[in-house]
Image (cartoon, helix red, strand yellow):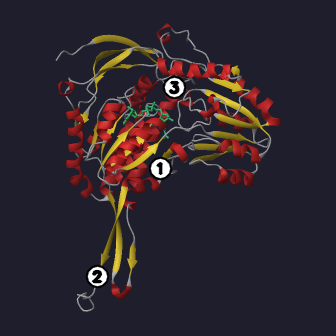
Amino acid sequence: MLLRKVLRTHQRGNRYISSNNTLLPLSYVNGKKLDQITSTQSNLRPLINPATGQHIGEFYDSSKDCVSAAVEGAVKALDVWRALTGFERGKLLKKAADLIRGDHVAITEMEVEDTGKPIWEARMDILGCADSMEFFGGVATTVKGDHMMLSNGNFGYTVREPLGVVAAIGAWNYPFQMACWKSAPALACGNTLVFKPAQDTPRTAVRLAEILTEAGLPNGAFNVIQGAAETGSLLTSHPDVNKVSFTGSVETGSKVMSSCAAGIKHVTLELGGKSPIIIFDDADLDCAVTGAMLGNWLAQGQVCSNGTRVYVQRSLMKSFLEKLITRTKAMKIGNPMEEDTRVGAAISSAHAERVLGYIELARSEGAKVEYGGARFVPADPLLKNGNFLSPCILTECTDTMRVVREEIFGSVMCVMPFDSEEEVLERANDTKFGLAAGVFTSNLFRAHRVISKLQAGSCYINNYNVNPVEIPFGGYKQSGIGRECGELCLQYYTQSKSVYVEMGDISADAPF
Ligand code: NAD
């Protein structure tokens, strides 16, 4: 097999380093990276740096045999892994947390190269992943059932048992985080996994597999396969897969759920959103502007929970917009490897075009572009082929416009005035999505009253897009089923076994 090696140079931060543009072995099965020869019959994909347009390398989709081997490995590893106590599994996850922290610089750089997001954001994500491993390492001992005393000394008890093999499928905006948010709780509960990252961001999940192996995870307990829809459906329809944990769009989530329905598999869906942020006129203006920026500009707007419908009480609208535009203009767009960059590159040129298409549509529907919404070419010639867009602020939107109703998954914020609490609640809930929602006000009675009426799974008061690992995350309505993070998440990776224990002689009173 011919190994193509092209020496390339690309920039990291303000230094230039060399790397091999080569065939990348990215399928990780039974504790080792698979030789590419096993995948030669499958599709070859380029891996492209969104900020430079350069080829990082190429990789094969995992073949059907490779997917089968990964599931088989996960089945075999189950006996060993689930036989450990929660405490023993937890110790290993905590070791993985330490290894992630020890290697976070390299993982962060890889994540930036794959996603195009600013390095400070990627670092925050990766360190948060270490926290996730540590948290689920800690709660692994709490996976337990109940005890029920019954008449005549009889009793019953329940045991929370693992589901078995989990197929986990991720989107491209938080690649390492998705691998950790799914594997940490699943492994804590005694399941094994086959993980498929999104085809645009295939690398950091493989690094996680290496780290888990180094931490002592049995071979086969965490496998990584590569590819897109075809590979994903091989996994979701596999008879030996017991649960699917999926993150992605509503459209794909629906297909995944149908596939799970056919095999009566457990399913968790983390899907899209079009979330509202409501800013009342008694809110701290600077905090409200910061909240709207946190709710729209992270990861080039490619965040599922983003609050892209920003409702501002009419009397505050002018001052809110002025501050928002001033602060948005001040954000540096450019090399994501530089610490002061606030806006990196969209995941692909096609995705950038899709976002620009929505902005054109908004114009044609009568919205006003207050700022941004165009291709941006940084001065650095190395970035001339990058997918950079200036963040877009729209006003004069109506609730029926497509830009207000559909998930764009890019930096497009619709700022709309409102007059009363009742009116804004009705407008905020008028959506098929229900992932997140935010309220800014200094009146805590109102804050809780409004939150209690918002149809969303993850709500924020006077902040936005903060996701501590202790708090469950997930959506209402078409934004999903099930939760990630928090102790609640353990319920989605276990099943309850009920046991009745007879302490007497049953033959005495038996009808036969
Ligand atoms: P996508 O639905 O196109 O793809 C997601 C994953 O599913 C990818 O790995 C893809 O290869 C795989 N896939 C595609 N077709 C499949 C099939 N038929 N069977 C099995 N797997 C299949 O989504 P995307 O473009 O990668 O990500 C963006 C979407 O993800 C947005 O809608 C965003 O809101 C959502 N998202 C949700 C969350 C959340 O936690 N709720 C987090 C991040 C992203």
Q: Left of 195 or right of it: where is 419?
A: right
Which-is-in-front pick, marks 3 and 2? 2
Q: Which numbered disc covers residue 397? A: none
Three-letter amino acid code at disc 3?
Answer: Pro
Above or below 282: residue 66? above
- First in sequence, mark 2 or 1: give its number: 1
The quadrant where residue 277 appears: top right
**Residue placed under numbered mark 1 in the picture:** 483
Q: Quadrant of the C terminus?
A: bottom left
Q: Earlier in the sequence, mark 3 or mark 2?
A: 3
- Residue 156 rendering spot, x and y as whole percentages: 35, 76
CB under 8 Å between callouts 3 and 1? no
Residue pictured at 21% horizontal, 54% vertical: 79
Ligand 1 positioned in quadrant: top left
Q: Determine whether the beta carbon of the residue marked 1 sits less than 8 angstroms from the nearest atom of ligand 1.
A: no
Q: Amino acid at mark 2?
A: Glu
Say which residue label 2 marks: 502
Q: Seen in the image, is 13 located left or right of residue 287?
A: left
Asked if labels 2 and 3 touch by Cβ distance under 8 angstroms, the answer is no
Q: Answer left or right for 133 relative to 216.
A: right
Q: Residue at x 31, y 31 (%)?
A: 226
Q: Is residue 228 left or right of residue 35?
A: right
Q: Which residue is mark 3?
A: 118
Q: Label 2: how many residues lie within 10 Å, few (<14), some (14-19) or many (20+)?
A: some
Q: Earlier in the sequence, mark 3 or mark 1?
A: 3
Label 3, ligand 1: CB separation under 8 Å: no
